[in-house]
Amino acid sequence: MPKKYIHRTIKIILLAAMLVTVLFVLQNILRHKSIYKLDETPETEMWQEFYKLEKNSLDVVFLGNSHVYNGINPAVLYGETGLKGFDMSTSNQDLFVSYHLFKEMLKTQSPSVVVLDTYALHLDLTDKEESLRSTYYKMAFDDMRLSSNKIEAVREWQKEKDDIDLIERLFPIFEYHSRWEELNDADFDAEALRSVNLGYAYSFKTCEGSEFKGYDHYDEPVEPQYRYREWLDKIIKLAADNDIELILVLLPDMTVSSGAAAATGQIADENGLTFIDYNEALRLNPIDIVPSREMRDIHHMNAFGAVKLTKALAKDLTECGVVSSGSNAYFDRKLSYHNKVMLNREVSTIEDYETYVDTIFNNDYIVFVSAKEEAFAGLTDSDKETLMRAFPGLDLSDCWGRSFVGAGGHSEYFLNKDDNLCRSDGRVSYTILNTEKIDLSSTLKDGTGFELESTGYFAGADSADGFNAEIRIAGRDFAENENGLNFVIYDPLTREVIDHCVFITTSADKPIYRSFYLK
């Protein structure tokens, strides 16, 4: 072949490679993303996390819909048993989706057990709900990597819905090319929002009601809807072919019928499978789920309910003979993340000044404080000592009417650590106390900028509206800007503000005001 043709061929190949690269980069930006903090569906984050898992690192995989990603917390399971689990769950996941997610999982993982929530066995997807089903299928498959399995899933989908375009589903940019005006931080930074942990999505919502009692007997079995029995049979065979124990479960839901559960139990018996029904009174009542405290709605657990449910599941899996393959540093970090998320929730509910200050400074947080007007007027010597313990080197012997700003935490989180910073046990604190208005700005090592402003009595007394407290994190002011000590708490692990409040320290009883609560 003449050299000119070789050169031309190489140029064409390079150009095609560049175009494909640009296409995939744009697609990754423009495609719709299911981010739990934005729309309470975790599919994008679930897939990102799944593909980062070390090969063959899982002992158990959980398949199912939102009952799973709201109800089974693998970090709790790991803490209880050492079992390394993952929620491979998606919103409204039916058994067609479960089957193909099972196949995708098998490419990189070989768990000894798969736990399948069978709520989907009786989903009633009528013709009028077909568009909704398409939406949930897109959410489940769009973030799956391009593969023969993904092509197979879309081809099967096309058999029932002929307007599904294979190219659009394999390359979602062709559907979402006009999303420019909807773009946000999560479209450009995969780490911008990290609210899903081992596939589990934290929720602290609660529902009305004080009692959730399960059924104490089973009605006549109800036939499964649609083709779901067919897909369940395929899942059963896939598990058997890969020497995986399949356990069927029905997670707590106030609307589940005992007839549906009876049908699942019947299928389990026919196939020699274990079936655990957590709506059965004998299993549900010992868990002691209180809806107003531990359910986000009548269908799902919240984070507190998930802890209870997962502990019960951990006990049941252990009794079924499921054993851990050993500890894992990655899962150790995931357990730490879980503990921090639950502690964050606790922090946002504390209302006692001393308890609050001790809690936020004895844990791995970055704490910002800004004083407004007569912020120190109601503090006793003991109260001052509490704050001085939090900010090593701070002297509050003469503080009435002063402006004050403080930023403290472990030194590893701060970008600038000059000689003016006070250090104690690896902690660093910026503190300024004087009679003038104070402005302080710097940057955390994770790139988050912060700006603090404080106007105490002496600095602002010349004007009725001269007093001010600002605490800006990444450009947003979180300070309550009330007369007293304004706090903003930043968690460097989750990279989010987990609480902001003000203690009205002009008063001896130091009441707290908090306009912000975790949901």
Image (cartoon, helix red, strand yellow):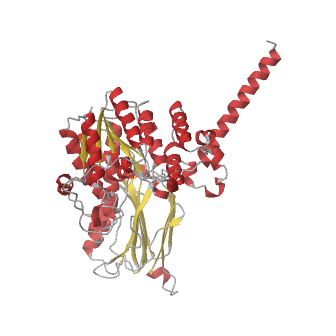
- Say if residue 271 shows up in the picture: yes
Q: Is 227 situated left or right of 381 in this image?
A: right
Q: Identify the residue at image location x=20%, y=35%.
A: 321
Q: Position of residue 102 (x, y in %)?
A: 41, 36
Quarter of the rendering occupied by the N terminus? top right
- Say if residue 420 shows up in the picture: no
Taking depth in this image into account, of 147 and 26 the one nearest to the observer is 147
Q: Position of residue 7 (x, y in %)?
A: 78, 20
Taking depth in this image into account, of 210 and 73 the one nearest to the observer is 210
Q: Identify the residue at image location x=36%, y=35%.
A: 233
143 to 508, vertically: above or below:
above
Q: Is 216 situated left or right of 134 in this image?
A: left
Number of numbered markers: 0
Residue 115 position by quadrant? top left
Q: Position of residue 397 (x, y in %)?
A: 32, 73
Taking depth in this image into account, of 506 and 210 the one nearest to the observer is 210
7 to 336, vertically: above or below:
above
Q: Is 343 situated left or right of 462 in this image?
A: left
Q: Position of residue 270 (x, y in %)?
A: 26, 36
Quarter of the rendering occupied by the C terminus? bottom left
Taking depth in this image into account, of 363 and 164 the one nearest to the observer is 164
47 to 234, vertically: above or below:
below
Residue 295 position by quadrant? bottom left
